[in-house]
Amino acid sequence: DADVTQTPRNRITKTGKRIMLECSQTKGHDRMYWYRQDPGLGLRLIYYSFDVKDINKGEISDGYSVSRQAQAKFSLSLESAIPNQTALYFCATSDFGLSAYNEQFFGPGTRLTVL
Amino acid sequence: AQSVTQLDSQVPVFEEAPVELRCNYSSSVSVYLFWYVQYPNQGLQLLLKYLSGSTLVKGINGFEAEFNKSQTSFHLRKPSVHISDTAEYFCASSSKAAGNKLTFGGGTRVLVKP
């Protein structure tokens, strides 16, 4: 079974609709992240959470909100979807430790299309 | 803020030929550098990372990268590519000051031709 799962894998919706993308992990990591991927722009950080009570905005948080329901679950919501939110969305997790860097592990992605 | 630039958006290459993907980063006192690969319809997988120490880093699938502080570069190389190396490759940076957050380049799409 995959360590980081995302649902749905594909979603088509209409402008103005509320959408929730879900991420679950079985790695036992404290830290979770949401990114969006656009052609030519790479991945950009939307929100991140270092534990259940810690939520932080990334570089492109406008139009998005998140919820950290448990250590293992981190949801991304689009309150009122617009076409320029059409993108590939990735969830990632990482451990917290004393090492210099803790590797991020990525889910398979959710392809969202807003018409 | 950190920035990462991948100089080539697409790189076509013949099977068994060498490939080099170029990456430049904005300077930071203690920078960590990474290369990720994204195969079609899949998530990102870490190829290799530079945290400190030897400037030549070896990763999975025969890839290696060289950290060059004076040129602020971290180019990825493979001496002989296979069809299965067709994928998109992302360079990324982080630092202690960035708190483990990654900054990605725009990606380089590698198409290996037979």
Image (spheres, helix red, strand yellow):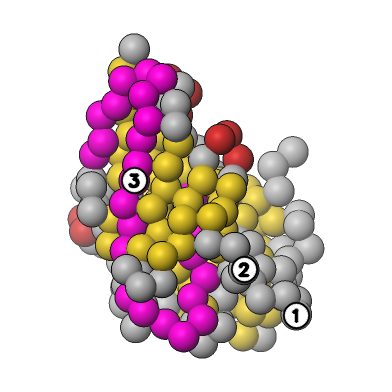
Residue A28: image quadrant is: bottom right
For disc 1, the marked residue is A98
| First to last magenta residue range | B10-36
B97 w.r.t. A63: above or below = below
Q: Is residue B108 above or below residue B5?
A: above
**Local SS, label 2:** loop
Residue at point 59%, 45% (across, down)? B59
Q: Which residue is mark 2?
A: B53
Question: Image point 26% across, 36% down: which residue?
Answer: B11
- For badge 3, the amino acid type reads Leu
- Label 2 vs 3, first from the N-terminus: 3
Q: CA distance from mark 2 to mark 3?
A: 22 Å
Residue A70 x %, y %: 71, 70
Q: Is residue B25 magenta?
A: yes
Identify residue type, mark 1.
Leu
Provide the chain ID for the residue under circle 3: B
User: Horizontal placement of B65 versus A98: left or right?
Assistant: left
